[in-house]
Amino acid sequence: MSTSSRRGFVKVAAAGFGFLPLSSLLYAAPGKPAATKRKIVCVGGHPDDPESGCGGSLAKFVRAGHDVTIIYLTTGEAGMPGKSHDEAAAIRKQEAINACKILGTKYIFAGQVDGDTIMDNTWLQKVSQLIANEQPDVVFTHWPLDTHKDHQVASLLAIQTWVRAQQRFQLYFFEVCAGEQTMTFHPTDYIDITDTQEQKRQAVYCHTSQDPPGIYACGHSAMEEFRGRELGVKAGEGFVRMNGRMQGGYVNI
């Protein structure tokens, strides 16, 4: 594709996609009506990932009147040494439910096993159906360059769902434990979470089995401050936007 035709395609693709800046989901322009109610889905590897990665933003979307659903790929079965998978799953599932109550979100547990996640056509179909059932306008998931296999699988399942989706949605990636888990993450978009930072913290602290102070020590306090500095506010969360759209079975970027 020539440079000129490629530029032309990008303009047409953006127009056809009906791109929604994240800010448009939260703030109405002066003199404009409030943002249209949207459906938002977040796909995380384990209980505590969506909360720590973008909990402030999810809470802010709920406050703005949008419907938000968190899909947990696993129930964190392997995350409690000394507990059986069944025992750990029961504890961590309740912790996630408690966190979702604080954020005001719906929750879904996809049914994969912590530490043994699978990326195949069967699971792609299952996760794609879970996402499609929510009819989302926007989906958030892990950045795929991550040292944790489960985070990578959650991300790839969401990406491939986006590629194949009959009802188009926008895809954004969040970060967790930057530099230790999420790698080489350079945001394209930011959300000011100054007014939901404490709500996010309360949601993270629902995950008592996962040492909440340790979660924040894993870079999350620094991430909120640094992304806030980049945005010019007290606290922020950063995201990478997936660009492009499908045309003739191929993703054009």
Image (cartoon, grey):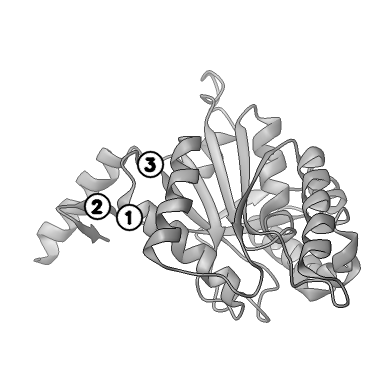
Q: Amino acid at mark 3?
A: Phe
Residue 184, quarter of picture: bottom right
Q: Amino acid at mark 2?
A: Met
Towards the viewer: 45 or 139? 45
Mark 3, Cα crowd under 10 Å, few <14 / some 14-19 / many 20+, is few
Residue at 53%, 63% (x, y): give it. 154
Residue 19 — which label?
3
Q: In the rendered view, does 119 fall on the left or right side of 103?
A: left
Residue 246 — which label?
2
Q: Is residue 242 visible?
A: no
Where 106 sits versus 28, above or below?
Answer: below
Q: Is residue 174 visible?
A: yes
Residue at 83%, 72% (x, y): give it. 80
Q: CA distance from mark 1 to mark 2?
A: 7 Å
Task: Determine whether the residue tagged by mark 2 lies in a helix, strand or loop.
Answer: strand
Task: Determine whether the residue tagged by mark 1 lies in a helix, strand or loop.
Answer: helix
Instruction: Find residue 64 and report its horizontal and vertical position in percent.
Output: 65, 30
Q: Amino acid at mark 1?
A: Val
